């Protein structure tokens, strides 16, 4: 039987990638289909120490490069795992627009690029479609639930849909997380970030090369429960981490989940002007504050609409 590889992006692995890969691997196993999880990207701070202690089996390179490929939580060709041979891709799941037409033409009904808050929502919907909802393991249910919470910023991000809320509520009956797990999760994310701020930023940063913007934009993202004092104390670390990407036009976006707004840090006049065109933001020197929560994928979408 041919093996199916479940994989995602090259640069880093976040909680949505991990949840989707683990849960989809389990779904294929329930269907008696041989598979393996291949995650070459380093785990970022959204995958906390508690989650890392769970029994998660994956490799960083495929056993057989001729395997069928399923891509989760990424659809932009620039960011997919480098080992992927396009002729072997049989299915894609993502929640970001921009490359949906390419994948629809290539894979037809096997391209699942849909506007929801979390890719984990799409994977849970597959469990229901295929009749395996009641077979989901505690591990997969836990990961999918946390991924939905993280990717919707505790349901405060505007990308959140009724489908995300429904998936979250349906998964509750299958999880075995502690009663205060929401607070515990975000506290652990913050602890991980503060342990090594430079690594936390570089492992969640992307260089955006967009047709609608005449220069590369480096965008870092840190999701904090409360971010109102972060930049007062850690601008130097943030600047050093973002300058490593080799482009002058960088910015750090920090969703402050409890405050329901973002802090944006940039020293680039061009980036300040760009952000002011696409979102409501008020800059005081090099720090701007938004009037609501923004995720990177939402800002990228706004940039594509310029």
Image (cartoon, rainbow, N blue to C red):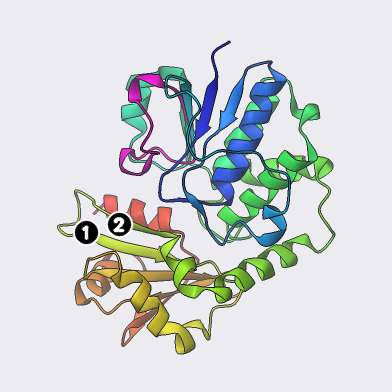
Specify whether 171 is left or right of 262.
right
Residue drawn where x is 47% and y is 39% of the image:
8
Q: Position of residue 169 (x, y in %)?
A: 75, 45
Question: Range of the magenta residues?
Answer: 73-92
Q: Is residue 33 above or below residue 254?
A: above
Q: Is residue 28 above or below residue 2?
A: below
What numbered label is drawn on residue 216? 1
Which quadrant of the rendered structure holds the C terminus?
A: bottom left
Q: Position of residue 117 (x, y in %)?
A: 54, 48
Label 2 belongs to which residue? 207
For label 2, the crowd category at 10 Å Cα-Cα, with few meaning under 14, some 14 to 19 and many 20 or more, is some
Residue drawn where x is 32% and y is 83% of the image:
286
Query: In the rendered image, which quarter is residue 121 located in?
Result: top right
Q: Residue furthest left?
A: 214
Which quadrant of the rendered structure holds the N terminus?
A: top right
Residue nearest the viewer, comparing 15 with 268: 15
């Amino acid at each position: 039987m041919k093996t199916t590889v479940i994989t995602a992006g090259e640069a880093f692995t976040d909680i949505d990638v991990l949840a989707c890969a683990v849960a989809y691997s389990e779904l294929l196993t329930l269907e008696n289909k041989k598979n393996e999880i291949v995650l070459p990207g380093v785990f970022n701070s959204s995958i906390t120490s508690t989650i890392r202690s769970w029994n998660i089996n994956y490799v960083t390179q495929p056993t057989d490069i001729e395997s069928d490929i399923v891509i989760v939580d990424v659809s932009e060709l620039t960011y997919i795992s480098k080992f992927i041979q396009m002729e072997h891709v049989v299915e894609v799941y993502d929640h970001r627009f921009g490359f949906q037409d390419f994948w629809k033409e290539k894979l037809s009904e096997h391209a699942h690029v849909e506007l929801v808050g979390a890719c984990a929502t799409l994977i849970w919907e597959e469990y229901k479609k295929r009749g395996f909802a009641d077979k989901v393991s505690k591990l997969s249910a836990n990961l999918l639930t946390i991924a939905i919470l993280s990717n919707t910023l505790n349901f405060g991000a505007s990308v959140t849909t009724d489908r995300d809320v429904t998936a979250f509520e349906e998964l509750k009956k299958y999880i075995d997380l502690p009663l205060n797990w929401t607070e515990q999760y975000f506290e652990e994310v913050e602890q991980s970030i503060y342990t090594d701020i430079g690594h936390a930023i570089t492992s969640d940063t992307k260089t955006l090369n967009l047709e609608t913007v005449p220069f590369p934009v480096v965008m870092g993202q840190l999701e904090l429960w409360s971010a109102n004092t972060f930049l007062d104390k850690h601008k130097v670390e943030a600047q050093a981490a973002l300058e490593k990407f080799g482009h002058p036009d960088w910015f750090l976006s920090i969703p402050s989940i409890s405050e329901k707004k973002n802090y944006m840090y940039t020293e680039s006049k061009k980036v300040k002007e760009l952000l002011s065109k696409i979102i409501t933001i008020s800059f005081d020197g090099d720090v701007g504050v938004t009037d609501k929560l923004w995720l990177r994928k939402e800002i990228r979408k706004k940039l594509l609409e310029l």
